[in-house]
Structure formats: structure tokens, C-alpha cells
Image (cartoon, rainbow, N blue to C red):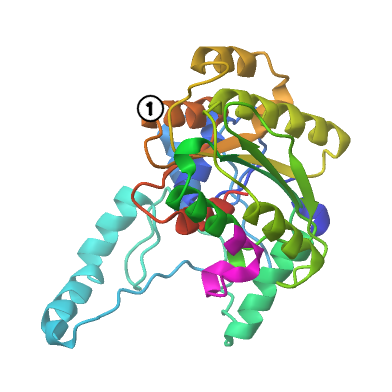
């Protein structure tokens, strides 16, 4: 499994974003693990220079099943009507034709565009403990180890609630969030973390290696100690900080190419110091090709320039997350699906 995952160049918390990123980087990627309907849809989209060949594991496959749950028992009649309609042959055929999803009821002929190999349906393990152990084994032992750069705004405008929220969001990733989603989004074994802070200038990056995932172990407490000591002051040199993150990430990538590198950029204000957006775009265009595998995920927060943060995500092949609508802790957990 480790040998298989060593070839991984991209990961995502969204099947749609993964497909879009594959299209944008198809000259540098050789394949993708995704839903069958997504892969078939890409082949029909006309966006691929070379169509994908679908491979089905001999050992078996898992059907993605998202049950529609009834939350209000007073709506049972309406619920039953909806379920009856969704499971009708007419709707199932329409769903298959328009989205290339397989029908869930027998008797609906398979669309000729959908392959018809012998598929062995694997049962899900019947205990949560087994499921969790499989997922944790993948995250901590089998997948390509990651190196995540967190570029954090500590300018004067972050003083107070903004900096407090930022500290909480990062510290929650050190196993302080004990919810199920918190357990899956925490920093992983073998992972390297670099925290790069900036105001009107860029502070030296601090590097941490996760060998011990114990919440009170040395690695997690070191990160929390560094984060808790952060103070807010000065201006906002967004692009200087991002440039430095790319320089450090490229140096790390050259020394250790068998890692998956990402950058998270969080700022609550507009750029006031250092290079501007045009300067950074010019800098990025002149980076070596391997830099394009290092994507930046921007976090819109406070009064940050939405257009600028979206542009950074677009240029670097990343994605913008809106921290003005959701708590930073939730946003950081979502981003972990892309690291």
C-alpha cells in the first residue's frame, strides 16, 4: 500500500475539486481515484486530452450510499412519497442518463456508456472501531507523508478575537478537538509542519515533525507552545510571506521529494507592505515546474481582500475557503482534507 500511494501527487476533500484540478494539471498527472460517475463524466466532457481508462479492483468495490433520513416523524407521508419517486424506474433512468450514476433498483437497463464488468460489492465492516482503525492506518502509516505550511497573519488588525480564533484553529489540530472530525483532521504521524507568521515583514519559519500523536506528547505540545506565544502587531505583507513559503517549500521538496507539500494562507486584511499581487504572479510564473505541485489554500477572514485571496488560489491551483461565514476551526478542518 505504501508503494502504491508513493505515486500520489494530489489529494482533496472534494471529489469535484479533485476532478477540476486533474483537468487543470492533466499533463502532469497519470490517473485519479474518484467516483465512477465522475470519471465517466470527465471522459464525456471534452476537457481531457486523453480519456481515462477505468480500472475496477478485482478484490471488490464499495458503493457510495448516502441515505435520505427522515428527521421529523410528522413528515412521514411526504418522505415516503419522495422516496417512492426517487426509487421509481423513471427517475432512476433519468438520473443514470444525466449523471452516469448506476441505478439502485433492479430492472433498469444499464446505460451503454457505463461499463458492465463483474463487480464484487464489498461489505462495510460492521463496527465503527474497525472502520476508524482502517482510516487511521491510511492517514498515519500508508499515505504519502505531508509537509504543510501554515502562513498566518499576525498583523495589528488580528489583535484580540482574530488572533485568538487563529490560535484555536491551529491548536485544535494538535488533538485538542476530540470530535470524530477532529480526530481525522489532526496532524498525522510522519507529517512535517511549518508555521510561518507575518505582519509588515516575514518571520522565520518554525518547523515541527510529528513522531508522537499523543495530545500531551512532545510534538503536539511544542506546536501549541509556539502558537500560544504569538502576538499581533504591524502591517500586512501577504505576498512577501507567500513568496517565502514557496521558497522554503521548494527547498524542502528538493531535499525530500517523497512528501506532499501544501500551503495554507490566512489573512484578515488587505496587503499593505512588500510586493504586490502583480509582483507575486510574476514570481510564481518563473518558478520551476515542480512548484506547481505545491498548491495554496487561502482562508478569507475579517476584512481580507476576497478578490486577491481568490486570485492566489486560482494562480496556484488551490482553493479559497470563506472564514467570514464559518468558524476558523471548521475551515482548518476542511482544509486538512486537501493536505
Magenta residues, dominant SS class: helix
- Location of residue 128 by image quarter: bottom right
Q: Secondary structure at mark 1?
A: helix
The residue shown at (18%, 81%) is 80
Specify whether residue 114 is in view. Answer: no
The residue shown at (51%, 12%) is 278
Specify whether residue 85 is in view. Answer: yes
Side of 98 where 209 appears, left or right: right
Residue 263 in magenta?
no
The residue shown at (70%, 63%) is 139
Image location of residue 4, percent across then percent down: 78, 53
Figure check: 302 above or below 58 = above
Side of 174 where 274 appears, left or right: left
Residue closest to the eye, 334 or 238: 238
Side of 317 where 87 appears, left or right: left
Mark 1 crowdedness (10 Å alpha carbons): few <14, some 14-19, many ≥20:
few
Residue closest to the eye, 68 or 257: 257
Side of 76 where 161 appears, left or right: right
- Location of residue 256 by image quarter: top right
Count of marks overlaid on the render = 1
Image location of residue 52, percent across then percent down: 57, 40
The residue shown at (38%, 27%) is 307
Image location of residue 37, percent across then percent down: 44, 52
The part of the chain drawn in magenta is 171-183
Image location of residue 238, percent across then percent down: 54, 28
- Location of residue 284 by image quarter: top right
Image quadrant for the N terminus?
A: bottom right
Figure check: 218 above or below 28 = below
Residue closest to the eye, 295 or 166: 166
Residue closest to the eye, 169 or 26: 169
- Which residue is under mark 1? 307
Amino acid at each position: 500500500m505504501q508503494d502504491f500511494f508513493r505515486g500520489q501527487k494530489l489529494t482533496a476533500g472534494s471529489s469535484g475539486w479533485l476532478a477540476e484540478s486533474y483537468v487543470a494539471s492533466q499533463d502532469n498527472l497519470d490517473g485519479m481515484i474518484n467516483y465512477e460517475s465522475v470519471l465517466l463524466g470527465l471522459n464525456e466532457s471534452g476537457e481531457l486530452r486523453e480519456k481515462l481508462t477505468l480500472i475496477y479492483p478485482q478484490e471488490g468495490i464499495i458503493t457510495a450510499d448516502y441515505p435520505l433520513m427522515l428527521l421529523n416523524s410528522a413528515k412521514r407521508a411526504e418522505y415516503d412519497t419522495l422516496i417512492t419517486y426517487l426509487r421509481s424506474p423513471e427517475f432512476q433512468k433519468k438520473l443514470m442518463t444525466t449523471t452516469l450514476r448506476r441505478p439502485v433498483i433492479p430492472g433498469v437497463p444499464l446505460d451503454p456508456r457505463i461499463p458492465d464488468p463483474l463487480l464484487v460489492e464489498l461489505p462495510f465492516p460492521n463496527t465503527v472501531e474497525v472502520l476508524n482503525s482502517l482510516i487511521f492506518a491510511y492517514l498515519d502509516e500508508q499515505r504519502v507523508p505531508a509537509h504543510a505550511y501554515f502562513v498566518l497573519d499576525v498583523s495589528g488588525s488580528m489583535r484580540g478575537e482574530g488572533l485568538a480564533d487563529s490560535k484555536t484553529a491551529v491548536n485544535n489540530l494538535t488533538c485538542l478537538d476530540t470530535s470524530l472530525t477532529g480526530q481525522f483532521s489532526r496532524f498525522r504521524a510522519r507529517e512535517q509542519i511549518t508555521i510561518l507568521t507575518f505582519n509588515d515583514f516575514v518571520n522565520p519559519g518554525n518547523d515541527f515533525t510529528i513522531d508522537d500523536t499523543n495530545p500531551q506528547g512532545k510534538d503536539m505540545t511544542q506546536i501549541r507552545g509556539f502558537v500560544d506565544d504569538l502576538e499581533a502587531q504591524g502591517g500586512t505583507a501577504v505576498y512577501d510571506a507567500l513568496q517565502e513559503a514557496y521558497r522554503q517549500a521548494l527547498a524542502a521538496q528538493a531535499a525530500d521529494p517523497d512528501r506532499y507539500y501544501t500551503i495554507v494562507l490566512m489573512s484578515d486584511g488587505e496587503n499593505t507592505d512588500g510586493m504586490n499581487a502583480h509582483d507575486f504572479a510574476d514570481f510564481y510564473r518563473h518558478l520551476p515546474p515542480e512548484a506547481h505541485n505545491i498548491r495554496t489554500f487561502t482562508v478569507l477572514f475579517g476584512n481580507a481582500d476576497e478578490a486577491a485571496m481568490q486570485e492566489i488560489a486560482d494562480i496556484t491551483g488551490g482553493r479559497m475557503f470563506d472564514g467570514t461565514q464559518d468558524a476558523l476551526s471548521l475551515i482548518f478542518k476542511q482544509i486538512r482534507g486537501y493536505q
